[in-house]
Image: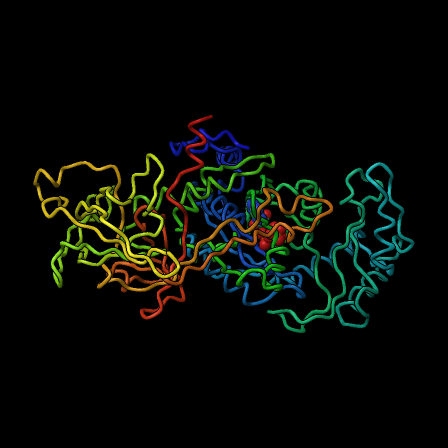
Amino acid sequence: MEDKSELLNSEERSLNFIEQIVETDIQNKKNKGLVYTRFPPEPNGYLHIGHAKSIVLNFGVAQKYGGKTNLRFDDTNPVTEDTEYVDSIQEDIKWLGAEWVGEARYASDYFEQLYQWAEKIILDGKAYVDDQSAEIISQQKGTPTQPGTESPYRSRSVEENLDLFRRMRAGEFKNGVKVLRAKIDMASPNMHMRDPIMYRILHAHHHRTRDQWCIYPMYDYAHGQSDYIEGITHSLCTLEFEVHRPLYDWFLEQIYTQETVRPRQIEFARLNLNYTVMSKRKLLELVNKKLVNGWDDPRMPTITGLRRRGYTPEAIRTFADRIGIARRDNIIDVGLLEFSIREDLNKKATRVMAVLDPIKLVIDNYPNGKEEWLETENNPEDESAGKRKIPFGRELFIERDDFMENPPKKYFRLSPGNEVRLKSAYIIKCVNVEKDENGVIKLIHCTYDEESRSGSGTEASKRKVKGTLHWVSAQHAIDAEVRLYDRLFNDPDPAGHKDVDFKEFLNPDSLTILKNCKLEPMLANAKAGEGFQFQRLGYFSVDKDSMPNNLLFNKTVGLKDAWAKEMVKE
Ligand code: ATP
Ligand code: MG
């Protein structure tokens, strides 16, 4: 785990190692001092919080040094890709506030160029067509300590290779019957250099090129060459590609000419968060098996899920900045993400009255039919947010667990004979309760001190009582459904168990739906995505499916700052 005091400090930070490399390159006038990055998602799923880290890094570095960033879809695998993902990825990047230059690009736009370069590599005697199956090829790879075995097809003539490769493209062969391999070194200590596959045959429909191609380039070949085509100077990727870097450079070496930009691959540690999974394959499985309600389920670590939950782009960007860029893998506490959104909403969110588990209360000495509009602050953290008026009346709702008939010592909420202040309103005292035939309390009778209204300036208004409760006027209250969320997994590393499937660790209590909530009337006009602080309860945001006659709220995050508290203790 990171040093927490370091993470909480949002002061100006020192350069990360990637910025240091970039600054050195600029000083040395490498690539004429240009900084050009790309964000290269594969459109086979929705973006998640890990991608946000990569987005903030790629777009952030370019922006900092006056450069540019491309969005490039790495769409070399037609089987898993889909335009739904292409659209969602663009929406999520824009929402995060990043802007790519020009149109989105696609590796598939370069298929012809990549093919032409493959022919050149064949002509140079550095690639060959292999007729062996993928299984055999993989068996011949050897081990890290033992060299691989050369394919019997390795010494095919240039003419034969070229002819076969052209016939592969023309569709003469079935899937898997032939591959094109780079001719590098079967004894290389780096397994990725042992004649890696460049092209495979795949008779499949591609979401962009349709049925134009039946051979597809492998990621390692396509990625670096696409960087080169776009003039990318710094190709930032996650650590698992470090061992691929010699291959990235080898492929570039085959086509590089002086006077062009020579991309450089730099690896950084991916974001790992505890209590979640972040592989798109696993997230897709949760969606397909309906273990969550889609990619935008507020429990998902996807950008669209976080957005629906009520996260703001600012909070996600601050989070990405805080965790920084490291060269070693680490695990970040999901509490830090929650800290970032809480901090942002604390600054921005209007404080409102909402009662999630209501019980009715009547003020016996308050005049029947009287209504008052009492002033309350919108946000004590932000004076410019101003004030508003909320309705008060004889009948109110309060939270069921803010009342106890037989309280323990030091219970400062409402109980018979005890006084509390109603936030922005009066001091009340409980006189008795009414119960139904099962002994369940259905009505709390109180009296109020007419002189004690908050802000009225009287002695009684300044009187201190130990507890302050939130409330909603029963006559004015509007109904809403509120959804509470807990962690999706109840294990810190659900995907990290060798013998147990990650789905075994799904938290059965991750979603609680409350259907009978009472809100102050101004929330009837709240718009989808808008965030509020429900006084004493936490931060909540309006769900995208919310309608004026069917209000839906999602709990974004609680008020209690367990993470920062823990930090102070340490
Ligand atoms: P997954 O393993 O979730 O399927 P991926 O790496 O295959 O992710 P891509 O669509 O290829 O997903 O990722 C696009 C970019 O985002 C890549 O540069 C990748 O390195 C980066 N990225 C993906 N996951 C993370 C993460 N957890 N932390 C930081 N960057 C990430
Ligand atoms: Mg990938």
Location of residue 180 (image quadrant): bottom right
Residue 235 visible in the snapshot = no
Residue 327 visible in the snapshot = yes
**Depth check, front residue: 436 or 301:** 436
> Can you give x and y, in whole percent of width and height, for residue 24 in the image?
51, 32
Look at the image and name its color scheme.
Answer: rainbow
Decide if residue 329 is on the left or right side of residue 135: left
Residue at position x 46%, y 39% from top? 336
**Depth check, front residue: 292 or 227:** 292
> Can you give x and y, in whole percent of width and height, for residue 4 in the image?
47, 31
**Depth check, front residue: 424 or 548:** 424
Above or below, 300 against 379 in this view is below
Above or below, 303 against 274 in this view is below
Decide if residue 504 is on the left or right side of residue 520: right
List the single residue furthest toward the right.
152
List the single residue furthest toward the front.
437
> Can you give x and y, in whole percent of width and height, for residue 550 in the image?
35, 69
> Can you give x and y, in whole percent of width and height, for residue 453 in the image?
13, 46
Numbered-mark total: 0
Decide if residue 244 is on the left or right side of residue 529: right
Residue at position x 19%, y 54% from top? 363
List the single residue furthest toward the left.
458
Decide if residue 317 is on the left or right side of residue 364: right
Above or below, 4 against 96 in this view is above
List the single residue furthest toward the top.
570
Q: Quadrant of the N terminus?
A: top right
**Depth check, front residue: 384 or 42:** 384
